[in-house]
Amino acid sequence: MSEPTYKRILLKLSGEALMGTAQYGIDPAVTSQIARDVQDVQGLGVETAIVIGGGNIFRGVAASTRGMDRATGDYMGMLATVINALALQDALEQHGVTTRVMSAIEMRAVAEPFIRRRAIRHLEKGRAVIFAAGTGNPYFTTDTAAALRAMEIRASVIMKATKVDGIYTADPLKDPNATRYDTISYLQVLEQRLKVMDATAISLCMDNQLPILVFNLRTPGNLRRAVLGEPVGSVVKG
């Protein structure tokens, strides 16, 4: 069996990914597929951390455009990520993956508080760790939380799971002439305003030379192929 290219990964999931084909909420079939993929890579000895968004339930930015205080909206969005984290934890544990949810906002009845050393210890013991509530601060996205947590736990790579198979010159769902990048630099992503992750997250990764792999979550087994170093998706690096 091939040796994994990455020993410790941070998987970034959007809240929208959990909706499946629905317009709102959580599709159990989607969480179950994600759980199977994580179980698969855990079986290879890869330590897996996950950061999840909350856009399938609530988006603070969208609420602020309708008159809600931005900070209040962002805190509500953070709580939505906790709901998603608990749903994913349930799916993972149904597939035999021991899981811990760690929240940037204290809520001890449902999640552990985020403590960096404890998170690393969970990973070393073979547990999947789901980081919820973003950074715990308004005005920061879960993309930025993913970059921050990846650096705190010394992950080898951020794996950004999307509904397309990489980074394109334009939205491939809207532009049939869009072409895919195999590799692209951080600066190109920023200069071309490609919607890979937000600018703060890209800058953090660039400053710390942390690669970002963008791949299609909807293809079962893609996560395993990615950690084994097969050419899946697009890579952002120096």
Image: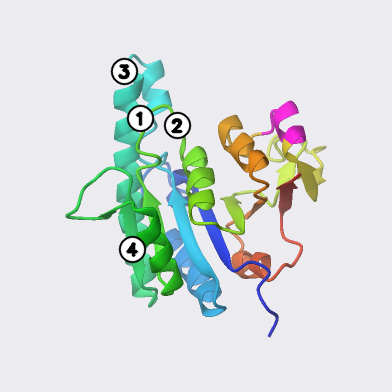
Q: Is residue 209 left or right of residue 10?
A: right
Residue that mark 1 sits on:
74
Q: Which residue is mark 4?
A: 100
Q: Earlier in the sequence, mark 3 or mark 2?
A: 3
Residue 89, given in percent of the width and then of the height, sits at: 34, 62
**Residue positioned most to the left:** 109
Q: Identity of the amino acid at label 4?
A: Arg
| Viewer can see residue 191 | yes
Q: Earlier in the sequence, mark 4 or mark 2?
A: 4
For the N terminus, give its image quadrant: bottom right
Q: Residue at x 61, y 62 (%)?
A: 219
Separation of residues labelled 3 and 4 (CA atoms): 32 Å
Is residue 98 magenta-colored?
no
Point out the frontmost of discs 2 and 1: 2
How many angstroms separate mark 2 from mark 1 (CA)? 8 Å
Q: Secondary structure at mark 4?
A: strand
Q: Residue at x 72, y 67 (%)?
A: 229
Q: CA distance from mark 3 to mark 2?
A: 15 Å
Amino acid type at image mark 1: Asp
* Residue 12, x across and y down, in percent: 52, 51
SS type, badge 2: loop
Q: Is residue 89 above or below residue 66?
A: below
Q: Residue furthest bottom?
A: 1
List the residue tagged with mark 2: 140
Which mark's residue is nearer the viewer, 1 or 4?
4
At label 2, the amino acid type is Phe
Mark closest to the chain's N terminus, 2 or 1: 1
Report the magenta residues as a range: 187-194
Mark 1 secondary-structure assignment: helix
